[in-house]
Amino acid sequence: MTADDYCRELEAYLCRKNDGHLVRIVGPSFDRVTGWAARGVPVKVACRGIDRYFERYYGRGPRRRPVRIDFCEADVLDAFDEWRRAVGVLAPAAETASAGPGGAAAPGAADGEAARAGARQSLPAHLDRVILRLTTLRGGGGVAPGLGAALERAVRELDVARGGARALRGNARARFLARLEALDAELLAAAREACSPEAVARLQDEAERDLSAFRARMPEAAYRAAVDAALNRLLRDAAGLPTLAFES
């Protein structure tokens, strides 16, 4: 994908988020967004960051004007950092995620800090959110039988555990967090099993494209592990699964 194609995809996505109002990515905005492409920010990750900005924007009340892409940068780079940590891609030492072109703080950086602070939540709140997402997914129809059964088992187990989550301490809490990771892996395995081989192959290709900017500086084993992790994230997104694992 060329830098122009990258910008056009994000321009079209921003247009949809702005209810059809087109805000062109030109001039300094074009330089900013092509900088994301140069860093290796996948389009879907950039879109996830744009979504985060819009969630807060809608949360403040009625919108007054269309959102420019520049305002989304802090959230885009936060989403990119999360993606890199998840797939095991290290940031270059000289790179600072909060810097815009020329090293200046990006517009909306304060919003990005607020997003990170707001992302921290208690274990019971995390379980409430996860159970709601899983229940909604299970009741939405169109779920493959194998995945539907895995969703049912996860909801039942988490619903029972939710009542005592607040009181968990020490080893008991550590065991429960490990169980959440195991449940998360079980749901991902069920989601993969529910996909056709052709769909998995397409997602595999997409994962490799997303990591192409980092391939040259990664050992083979690290690259293959990163592709597997990126594929799991794409499978999660395709199935609409929340992340069950919890970071204290």
Image: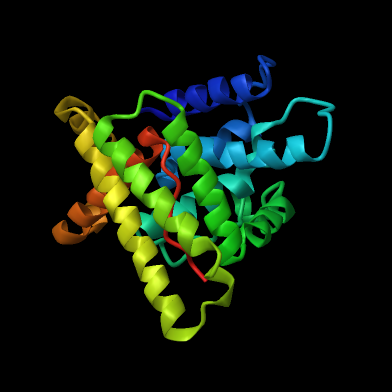
Q: Position of residue 234 (x, y in %)?
A: 34, 39
In this image, 205 relative to 124: left or right?
A: left
Q: Position of residue 239 (x, y in %)?
A: 37, 35
In this image, 81 relative to 75: left or right?
A: left
Q: Position of residue 121 (x, y in %)?
A: 62, 62
Q: Position of residue 166 (x, y in %)?
A: 59, 71
Residue 192 location, quadrant: top left
Q: Residue at x 43, y 47 (%)?
A: 39
Q: Is residue 15 above or below residue 104?
A: above
Q: Residue at x 21, y 54 (%)?
A: 223
Residue 72 location, quadrant: top right
Quadrant of the drawing holding the N terminus = top left
Relative depth, front residue between 147 and 156: 156
**Residue 35 in sight:** no
Which residue is the extreme one toward the bottom?
Answer: 170
Q: Is residue 203 above or below residue 189?
A: above
